[in-house]
Image (tube, rainbow, N blue to C red):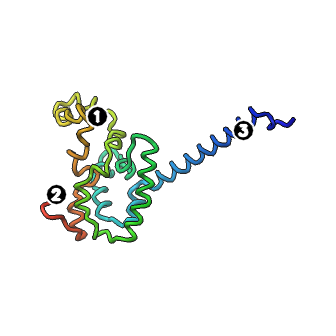
Amino acid sequence: MTFFSNPVVRTLAVLAVVGVGAIASWAVLDTAFHATGDYEFCTSCHGYEPIAAAYREDTHGGNNPMGFRAACNDCHLPHDNSLHYFWVKARHGIVDPTMSLLTKPEDIDWHGIRERREEFVYDSACLNCHKYLQEASEGNRKAFRGHRRYFKDPDDYSCVECHEHVGHNRLGYHLEEMGWHKSEGEKE
């Protein structure tokens, strides 16, 4: 009788191989998703200089005294669970480069997209970095008053509903500079 003829040993060996394969696959996917999630990578494919310029000017883009910089993945992917994160990343990984090949960036209605920002910025992403927002703002009446509705019912409000220009400082200006014009009646 050989060592692997024992059904328990065989089962454990198969589970070990499957487990190692799953962990290795997860590590490869996670590494690839994070390596392709910063603005250098995103704008190298997309060629969207106005979006990159506005990002670099923003606090979240590194224009702050702390040296902190959020990656595109940090804001534009959901952080509620890994499956949702990977699904949205994969979808963007297919749609965004395809649109870059089929459409000139200046022909995209960026101003219209900005109006639908809740579809592209996730509260779970904001709260991934701003985990202690409620506790931190409770000691500051002005900050707490501004966030009170959100804390009471976060399902009815989104972060970017009030923080319209977060992540891309003066994006309207940068779009205009490139000749990517504003929609009628849009405010900066």
Q: Amino acid at mark 3?
A: Ala
Q: Which of the 4 image quadrants contains residue 108?
A: bottom left
First in sequence, mark 2 or 1: give its number.
Answer: 1
| Residues marked 1 and 3 touching at CB (< 8 Å) | no
User: To which residue does mark 3 refer?
Assistant: 13
Image height check: is 33 above or below 43? above
Residue located at (58% from left, 48% from top)? 25
Residue 133 — which label? 1
Give the quadrant of the N terminus: top right
Q: How many numbered discs?
A: 3
Which residue is located at x 32 percent, y 46 percent? 122
Among the two numbered marks 1 and 3 on one chain, the one whose residue lies closer to the N terminus: 3
In three-dimensional space, the C-alpha distance between marks 2 and 1, rounded to whole angstroms, equals 27 Å
Q: Position of residue 42 (x, y in %)?
A: 40, 60
C-alpha separation, residue under disc 3 versus residue under disc 2: 61 Å
Which comes sooner in the sequence, label 3 or label 2? 3
Amino acid under disc 2 = Glu
Q: Kindly give the residue lying farthest to the front in the view shown.
A: 7
Q: Is residue 23 left or right of residue 9?
A: left
